[in-house]
Amino acid sequence: MTVAAPVTAAEVPAGYLASLGTSRHDVVVLGEVHDNPAHHDAQAVAVAALAPAAIVFEMLSHEQAALVTPTLIGDAAAMAAALNWAESGWPDFAMYHPIFAAVPTAAIYGAQVSRAEAGLAFDQGAEAVFGAGAARFGLDMPLLPATQAAREAAQLAAHCDALPADILPGFVAAQRLRDARLAQMVLIAISETGGPVAVITGNGHARNDWGVPAVLAIAAPDVTVLSLGQLEAAPDGDPPFDLWVISDPVTREDPCAAFLNGN
């Protein structure tokens, strides 16, 4: 494994992402707010600088990732069709294509947790759904009470404070499954390509305190990880990333309107 350059938690200065190729980390987790085009532009810049051997996408299944080739990447429309992106529920493929195109020779890995799997994790727990190897990723152990409470509070806030308390543990279990699946695919990518590996995922999974970096610290403590969060407002204190970017928010409908209207 490589020796990581020292990192001090900090807001990223202008132009920093273009220099990420000097980071010398095995894994760079690039967070995003999914529907913010600026975040995907930044990820593409970072990936081009890193020139990773592999890229792990939260948005792709294993089967979809297997379809991606440099030739397919060369035709954005054909790629979107091959991946059935329009039916995926993710934002416009035009936002994501430049990330693939930044290093078209990188091996592509999919870490998507299906809705069915997430539903099972909600009901049965992450360990039962993950299967063999769950203990390596910490899924056999309950979270510390303070961490469980913090994660439930985050899920409640993300759902407009409109969820009953008794179902919040299920949401946390589903997120733990997603974190573990991403970490699992990162380690497979390192094993098969030698790394480095870039990870394209939501900010929640990029968090150092309980996201992919935290799971990798359990599963493979010798793997060096750098996390980048992309925010839409100045944080109160230091957010849970090694580095972070603040960009303008996008105009979007109020996600809480349906709850407030009683729908």
Image (cartoon, helix red, strand yellow):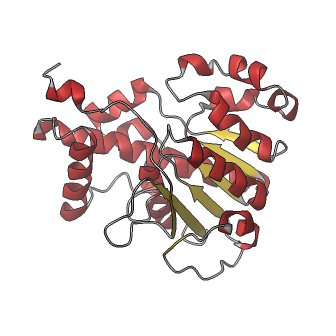
Task: List x then y, in percent, for residue 218.
Answer: 46, 65
Q: Which residue is at the front of the view, 118 or 161?
A: 161
Q: Residue at the right extreme?
A: 71
Query: Residue 116: x percent and y percent?
Result: 40, 23
**Does the image show residue 119?**
yes
In the displayed structure, 62 sits above or below 197; it is above
133 vs 95: above or below: below
Query: For the point 56% across and 69% down, which residue is it?
Result: 12
- x and y, in percent, of residue 100 in the image: 74, 40
Q: Quick one: 214 or 161, which is closer to the camera?
A: 161
227 relative to 109 in the view: left or right: left
Q: Is residue 194 visible?
A: no
Dividing the picture into quadrants, the one containing residue 97 is top right
Query: Which residue is depicted at the point 16% across and 41% down?
Result: 161
Question: x and y percent of residue 163 in the render?
Answer: 16, 35
Q: Residue drawn 66% across and 54% down?
A: 198
Give me the residue at 62% from left, 61% from top.
28
Left-right relation of 123 to 3: left
Q: Quadrant of the N terminus?
A: bottom right
- Pick the residue in front: 227 or 135: 227
Is 192 rendered above or below residue 6?
A: above
Relative side of 209 to 69, left or right: left
Q: Quadrant of the C terminus?
A: top left
Q: Is residue 148 above or below residue 69?
A: below
Figure label count: 0
* In this picture, residue 221 sits left or right of residue 205: right
